[in-house]
Every structure is written in C-alpha cells, then in structure tokens.
C-alpha cells in the first residue's frame, strides 16, 4: 500500500507540474520582462511617437518604423504619467514577446505534425527563452520584437491554412519598420510553399494592380528612408569588424548555434526529408548569416532572428517521442548548455543575469514631477521622460548627422535642464566645458540654465541615483 501511495503521489505531483508550469513560465517571464532594465534605444521611439498626434511637430525619423511608432503613439492618448507610461509599455511588450515565442513554437508543431503537450512546451521554453540573448531581449520595446510578433502569427495562421490571416500578418510585419524587409525572404519561402496555386491565381487576376501597388510602396519607402538607407550601407565599410555584442553572442551561445547549424545541414541534404524541414534549415542558415554579416548586430536585432536560427533545434525536440527517459536526458543537456552559456556570460563579460529598471523608474518619477511642476524643457540625448517637454536629440556614435543636430540643440541653450546620460556623455569634455559656462549643476548629472538657477526651486530627490550610470548604451 505504501508503494502504491508513493506512486500515486508522484503521479499527482507530475500532473500538477505538467498542468501549471506553463502558467508559471508565463507569469514569471512577463514579470521578468516588465521590470527589466530599459535600454537607451528604447526611450527615443517611445517619446517621439507622440509626434504622430495632432498639435505636435512631426518627427520624420518615425517614418522609418511607421507601424511600430503608430502603435506607440496610441499610449500618449491615455492619461498617464511618465512612469505609468513606461511600465505599461514594458508589460505589453513582455506579453508580445512571450506570445511571439509561444505561437512560433505552436506553428512548428503543426507543420511537423508533432504531438504538442504542455510538458513538451516547458522544454521548448527552456531551449528558447533560456538562451541568454533571447532571455534578455524578448520583451524589448523595439520594432524588431514587434516584427517578430507579427511573423510568428503569420507562421501560426499559415500552419492552420488560414491564408487571408497569414498574408495579413505578413503585411503587418513588413510595415512595422524599414528594417523588416530582412524578414521578406523568410516570409516568401514559407508562403509560396504553402499557397502556390492560391497566390498564382490571385496574382494572375490582379497583376497590374499588384505591380503598381508594389512599385508605389517601394518608391515611397525608399524616398522616405533614403538617409537611413545610406547610413545602413555605410556601416558595411567595416563589415569585417565584429562588434562586441556579436562576439559575446557567438561565444555565449556557441552550443545552441552549432547544434542548429548541424541540424540545418542535415535537414537540407537528406533526400526523403519533409519539405518543411528543408525550409526550416534554409531559414536557419539565412537568419544566421543575417546575424553574422550585419555590422550592427545588436542584441535586440539578434534576438528577433534567433527563433528562426534555432528552428531546426526546436523541430528536433518536437519530433522526438514523448517518454520520461527522453525528457530526463533533454533536461540534463539543456541544463548543461544553460550553465555553460551563463558561466561564460558572467565570468568572461561580467554581465548580470538580471538587471532591474527600479532605479530608472525612481529617477524618472522624481525628476519628471519636478519638470512638470515648473514647466521645464530637458535634453538628455535619448528622451527618458515621454510626457515631458523633450528637446529632440538622439546621440549615436555612428550617426554624424544626428550628433551634429544634438550639438546644435545643446549650443542653442534651448533646454532648461540638461541631464547627463551615457549617450550625452559621448561628447566627452566638449559638453562639460559648455555646461560649466552656461549651466549650474544642482545634483550629480543634472544641470540647470544659469538664468533659472535662482528662479526655480529645485526639489532634492530622495535617492542618490546618477543618470550616467542608469541610462547607458546597453542594447
């Protein structure tokens, strides 16, 4: 009886774990993303997206990411303060990131006719979310992550043979930003394989309309983004130089990358393989090449392609027979790779596994209240407070035009307050020499215009947080 009782207890525990761990993963990962450190490049589109609204002077750089910035603009119409605005967006993009991975994996399971159990889903989350690059970037408020969300739904509806919805989400993906064009080959290889006859008949009936519409959209996109196109092409002058982010990725995630490449080649050369396996192998190699060849392979960009790059590995897990010994072996292998990746990440690069946004939120909450109370403008080179009067200026080490504009804004003394972030500190001694002549420091990294020093009462913050340390160049 004791043996039977122990056996029943183990079975009950197994069922509980099987039933509730996906929900625990969901809640845990969404909270993880919602309260993770906000990278400097996320602030600019959040703040500038309000220029889509009436009464604002439009920021034309928003046209580089039309659907992404239009989506962000919606939140400026909701009555929120700065911290509520940022935390709401962090929560929403954490949800989008989670569902991107979930529906991507569901699509793979349908395409490969594999049994999709909740227990198997847990291991797939281990193999996707628990890769360091994906774990630290799946929730980013970036056009790359929104594009992946639409592409995942495109694949999911494609797997269900709902062609109108899949084509609709493919259009949304391509309209998200000009950079989304890199997903076009991935979309096409899956789309044409599934809907050859449907697309052929549709194109045959509407060939003139489709030709004119495609040409118009292409000309419109190029005309509006010619500057950014030249800038992107210019980055390939140093195409043989691997940036530090890419070096870190290659070293930290080497096991996952190597296994995926081997499986991709295997899928492609096997004669009797399923056509979807071959397409996944092709998509994996294409995505890996995009990661390796782009001089600006930053973490958020890499993470948007990782699901395709690791696709063959996910398919391999999905297609294995479901038995306890297999899951034990898989768990051991996954744990070993996970320990390797994070030990390299921490020991070699001194990176943190988790970086909270608490200090950022505290600083923004205290400083934005003071700015709003005194109706002050601010300049920080990135736009950390979306609801305040921001002097438009984004500092980027590789963008001379943007940096020149920032210098002009700074020297015009149009800003009441200047906050030294790492992006603004890129100007080095130049900005500090300027500040010492025209501004007075009221707290570390916070400077007020000299003629306002005695007119405006500065409210001391309750915390001694230095902006230069919490608003950095990460990602």
Image: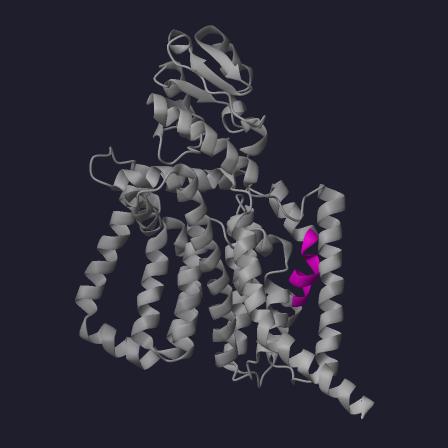
Quadrant of the snapshot with the N terminus: bottom right
Quadrant of the snapshot with the C terminus: top right
Which image quadrant is residue 172 in? bottom left
Q: How many marks?
A: 0
Tell me which residue sits at (44%, 32%) in the image: 382
| Near-viewer residue (430 or 70) | 70
| Near-viewer residue (25 or 6) | 6
Tell me which residue sits at (37%, 10%) in the image: 455
Tell me which residue sits at (35%, 71%) in the image: 166
Q: Outermost residue toward the bottom?
A: 1
In the rendered structure, the answer to whether residue 19 lies left or right of residue 183 reads: right
- Residue 17 rendering spot, x and y as whole percentages: 64, 75
| Near-viewer residue (213 or 45) | 45
- Residue 73 rendering spot, x and y as whole percentages: 31, 45
Q: Main secondary structure of the magenta part?
A: helix
In the rendered structure, the answer to whether residue 20 lies left or right of residue 234 reads: right
Residue 129 painted magenta: no
Q: Is residue 248 above or below residue 393?
A: below
Which image quadrant is residue 152 in? bottom left
Which image quadrant is residue 390 in? top left
- Residue 376 shows in the view: no
- The span picked out in magenta is 252-259
- Residue 39 shows in the view: yes
Q: Is residue 256 above or below residue 160?
A: above
Tell me which residue sits at (64%, 65%) in the image: 126
Q: Outermost residue toward the front?
A: 1
- Residue 147 rendering spot, x and y as whole percentages: 41, 57
- Residue 388 rendering spot, x and y as whole percentages: 35, 30
């Amino acid at each position: 009886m004791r043996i039977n009782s122990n056996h029943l207890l183990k079975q009950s525990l197994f069922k509980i774990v099987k039933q509730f761990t996906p929900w625990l993963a969901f809640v845990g990962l969404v909270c993880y993303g919602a309260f993770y450190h906000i990278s400097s490049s996320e602030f600019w589109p959040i703040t500038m997206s309000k220029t889509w609204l009436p009464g604002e002077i439009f920021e034309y750089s928003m046209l580089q990411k039309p659907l992404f910035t239009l989506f962000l603009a919606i939140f400026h119409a909701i009555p929120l303060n700065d911290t509520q605005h940022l935390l709401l967006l962090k929560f929403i993009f954490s949800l989008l990131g989670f569902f991107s991975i979930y529906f991507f994996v569901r699509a793979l399971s349908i395409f490969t006719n594999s049994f999709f159990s909740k227990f198997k889903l847990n291991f797939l989350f281990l193999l996707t979310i628990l890769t360091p690059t994906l774990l630290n970037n799946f929730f980013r408020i970036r056009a790359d992550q929104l594009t992946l969300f639409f592409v995942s739904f495109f694949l999911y509806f494609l797997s269900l043979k709902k062609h109108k919805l899949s084509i609709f989400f493919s259009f949304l993906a391509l309209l998200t930003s000009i950079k989304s064009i890199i997903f076009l080959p991935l979309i096409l290889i899956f789309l044409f394989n599934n809907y050859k006859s449907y697309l052929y008949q549709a194109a045959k009936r509407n060939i003139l309309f489709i030709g004119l519409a495609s040409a118009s959209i292409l000309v419109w996109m190029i005309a509006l983004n010619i500057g950014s196109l030249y800038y992107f092409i210019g980055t390939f002058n140093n195409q043989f130089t691997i940036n530090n982010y890419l070096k870190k990725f290659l070293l930290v995630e080497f096991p996952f990358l190597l296994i995926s490449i081997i499986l991709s080649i295997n899928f492609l050369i096997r004669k009797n393989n399923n056509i979807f396996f071959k397409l996944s192998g092709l998509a994996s190699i294409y995505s890996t090449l995009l990661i390796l060849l782009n001089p600006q392979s930053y973490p958020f960009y890499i993470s948007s392609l990782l699901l395709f790059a690791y696709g063959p590995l996910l398919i391999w897990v999905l297609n294995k027979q479901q038995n306890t010994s297999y899951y034990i072996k898989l768990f051991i292998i996954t744990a070993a790779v996970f320990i390797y990746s994070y030990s390299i990440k921490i020991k070699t690069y001194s990176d943190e596994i988790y970086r909270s946004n608490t200090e950022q939120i505290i600083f923004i909450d205290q400083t934005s209240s003071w700015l709003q109370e005194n109706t002050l403008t601010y300049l920080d080179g990135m736009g950390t407070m979306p609801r305040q009067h921001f002097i438009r200026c984004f500092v980027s080490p590789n963008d001379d035009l943007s940096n020149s504009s920032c210098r002009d804004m700074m020297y015009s003394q149009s800003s009441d307050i200047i906050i030294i972030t790492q992006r603004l500190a890129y100007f080095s001694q130049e900005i500090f020499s300027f500040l010492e002549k025209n501004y007075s420091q009221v707290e570390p990294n916070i400077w007020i215009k000299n003629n306002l020093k005695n007119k405006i009462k500065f409210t001391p913050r309750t915390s001694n947080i230095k902006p230069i340390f919490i608003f950095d160049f990460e990602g």
